[in-house]
Image (spheres, grey):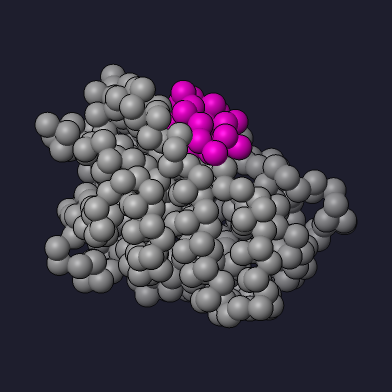
Amino acid sequence: MRVLCATTANDGHFGPLLPFARALADAGHEVRVAAPASYAAAVAKAGFAHEPFADGPAELIGPVMGRLPTLTFEEADDIVVREVFARIDAQAALPSLITTIERWRPDLILRETAELASLAAAERAGLTHVHVCIGMHEVLSRFVQAIDDPLEELGRLAGLAEGRMTSALASETVLSLVPEVLDDARAQVPSDSGDLLRFHEPRPGADAQSLPEWGDPQLPLIYVTFGSVTGSLPPFVGVFRRALDSLAEVRARVLLTVGRKVDPTGLGPLPSNAHVEQWLPQDAVLRQAAAMLGHGGFGTTMGALAAGVPQVVAPLFTFDQIVNGDHVAAVGAGLTVERGPSSVELAAAEVPRLLADPEYAASARRIASAIADLPSTAEAVDTLAALVG
């Protein structure tokens, strides 16, 4: 079976797609990844052949992004979904995706939530398409509500009848890495929607000795991470220093990762309880962490939950970060604070509470068990093959 996976140029979007792509490849199927030309290095690093398509033109995206400071947070989030993902990016990607499908003739299109051109191209070619959700279904519901007009516009560009894209999206089979106990938004999915199938990503073993050594090893380890994107966003670079300063008096070791685009030496002298790295294997860190402070990114949030580590969420810049924090708090696996200029400081102030109350860790372990009890992504392969027929 030939499978074309489609993603936008975003690690947080490609991440949930990857375990399914790898499971298909491990089972002997031929897998390629369609992604923007700018994302070639990430696709190559993941070990897949790249089928490039055009990035959204900067001259179109720039004016949209320039409007964001004048909008409310909710309005800004919706306009990025509607105008950037569903209109500019999708329309730029569509011609190459149509050409790739005509040339390579895949049997299945496996796409992530925000990559919509592959949905139109698959419908045009009469191919089976499946959607890998990049977050909670509450996020998916909001995403779908925001894209009605550009979705139908994309369908017209692909030569599809009016309403075809809307019905295709509603009936699409959805794969999720979120257990039902955490993802309580099934009721928000229309009753005529496609199947929602849940799987878990098997976690590789990690070397407990792979972490740097500093401070008193008897103290609990607090892992602080704001994902792979934050360091490249100028308005948010200051969160790293603010987090270190806010945790300086906590009786714990603080391990901060800042991403490969940030030079740790630029943070200045560190508090005595802190150590900073650009990047470390998240699974290895979480195996030793007593708590995590993060921004609510999907990969970061689910990584801590899968490891049974309680977390404090400080949402920074997207709606899904708020949703993820709310879900973590709702199941008792951590705490969340209101998004705002002091969210990092507010979250840091909650860390001692997280360490002192064992119920947070117990709840996180319950969610970890629920994740581990799901079928593995390897078991999704037969399901996908059956959908193709």
- The residue sitting at 15% across, 67% down in the picture is 191
Q: Position of residue 97 (x, y in %)?
A: 41, 35
The mark total stands at 0
Q: Position of residue 305 (x, y in %)?
A: 42, 57
Identified at 43% across, 32% down, the residue is 33
Q: Tell me what residue is drawn at x 34 percent, y 59 percent.
A: 152
Image quarter of the C terminus: top left
Residue 289 visible, this angle: yes
Q: Among all residues in the image, which is located at the extreme right?
A: 269
Visible residue check, residue 373: no
In the image, residue 321 lies at what x, y percent? 50, 66
Residue 374 is left or right of residue 135, and the answer is left
- Residue 41 lies within the magenta run: yes
Q: Which residues are magenta?
A: 33-54
Residue at figure coordinates x 27%, y 41% from the top left:
124
Q: Give whichever of 169, 371 is nearer the camera.
A: 169
**Quadrant position of residue 329:** bottom left
Q: Quadrant of residue 260?
A: top right
Query: In this view of the protein, which residue sits in the foreground, 353 or 228?
Result: 228
> 186 or 362: nearer the eye?
186
Residue 237 part of the magenta-drawn span: no
Residue 1 in percent (x, y) is at 24, 23
Residue lying at the far top of the rendered structure = 28
Examine the rendered structure and indicate whether residue 58 appears above or below residue 271. above
